[in-house]
Image (cartoon, grey):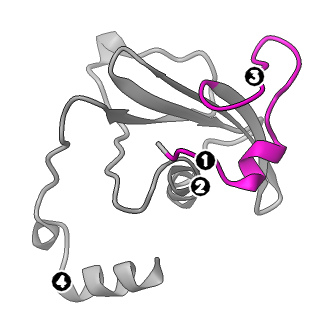
Amino acid sequence: MRKQLPAIVEIGRVRFGRYASHWGIPGAFNVRHNGVEFLMLASDGQGWEHVSVSTQDHTPSWDDMCWAKDLFWDNDECVLQFHPPRDQYVNLHPHCLHLWKPLRHVVPVPPPKLVGPMSCVAKMSSKS
């Protein structure tokens, strides 16, 4: 996770109430993006970094999750979204997704060519 969070995140830090914090991680953050208000809860514990991303009225899109990932982690860090077995589902909010990064393990990543043509990989990496 980033050592210093971007200004847009810090400005939205929740400083009063149940999720209040004043610096670092853990923390709760209200951040606007593309006209939408996102609530993000960041934590680290038990060997994991974690950010939940939610909105009031719709589930975050892939682009929303990429944006959230870039707020909390560097470009060279691999972060995961899990689809656990159904009997392990936890759903406290209907429009919330989660990003996870294990601290004690390197996440294996499939070769990009198994996902799509290498020409697409080059185009995507040039956007960052």
Closer to the eye: label 1 or 4? 1
Which element carries disc 1, helix, strand or loop? loop
- Residue 19 drawn in magenta: yes
Residue 48 placed where, x, y %? 37, 25
Q: Is residue 43 magenta?
A: no
The mark nearer the N terminus, 1 or 2, is 1
Residue 118 marker: 4
Identify whether 53 is placed above or below 25: below
Mark pair 1, 2: CA separation: 21 Å
Q: Which residues are magenta?
A: 2-26
Q: Label 1 amino acid?
A: Gln
- Disc 3: which residue: 21
Residue at image coords 54%, 61%: 63
Q: Which mark is first along the chain, 1 or 3?
A: 1
Q: For mark 1, what is the residue? A: 4
Q: Is residue 124 left or right of residue 122?
A: right
Q: Quadrant of residue 83?
A: top left
Residue 68 to residue 125: above or below:
above
